[in-house]
Image (tube, grey):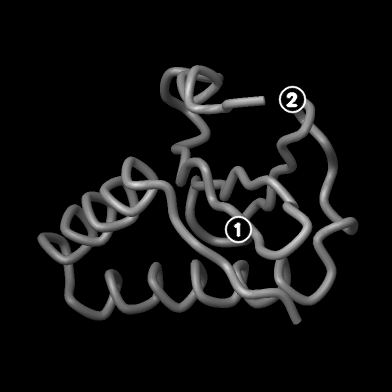
Amino acid sequence: MKPFGFQREAREEVLAAARFYAAESPSLAGRFLDEIDSLIQSICEAPNQFRVIYPPCRRALGSTFPYALVFVDQSERIWIVAVAHLKRRPGYWKDRIRL
């Protein structure tokens, strides 16, 4: 299993979403973070199972919340570029990719 890291903006996005859900219900925020953790584990175990959406980025979709993890499978780690809401500003994260 590969290690992973978050781009600063992606970390801010997951925290902002968790705060939003916590305002509704602390347990809802907990379920959101559990889903993010589960996605990260799946990505780190088998990153190629996820579809390339903007080379070299792949996207992992959650099953409950309208968020996706956008990541790059680097040689030594998984780099999470965005925690993107699926209904807002598609592709806003593309300028974060440095090839």
Mark 2: secondary structure: strand
Direction from residue 80 to residue 54 in the image, left or right: right
- The location of residue 76, given as percent across then percent down, is 72, 64
Disc 2 or disc 1, which is closer to the eye? 2
Residue that protrudes farthest toward the left in the picture: 23
Amino acid type, mark 2? Tyr
- CA gap between label 2 and label 1 equals 18 Å
- The location of residue 23, given as percent across then percent down, is 10, 60
Q: Quadrant of residue 77?
A: bottom right
Q: Quadrant of residue 47?
A: bottom right
Specify the label residue 30 is tagged with. Answer: none
Residue picked out by circle 1: 62
- The location of residue 5, given as percent across then percent down, is 49, 62
Sequence-earlier tag: 2 or 1: 2
**How many neighbours does mark 2 have within 10 angstroms: few (below 14), some (14-19), or many (20 or more)?**
few
Residue picked out by circle 2: 54
Residues 49 and 55: in front is: 55
Q: Residue at x 68, y 52 (%)?
A: 60
- The location of residue 49, given as percent across then percent down, is 89, 58
Direction from residue 21 to residue 44 in the image, left or right: right
Amino acid type, mark 1? Gly
The quadrant in which the C terminus is found is: top right
Residue 15, above or below 70: below
Direction from residue 92 to residue 8 in the image, left or right: left
Q: Quadrant of residue 4?
A: bottom right
Q: Residue at x 82, y 36 (%)?
A: 52
The quadrant in which the N terminus is found is: bottom right
**How many neighbours does mark 1 have within 10 angstroms: few (below 14), some (14-19), or many (20 or more)?**
some
Q: Residue at x 58, y 26 (%)?
A: 98
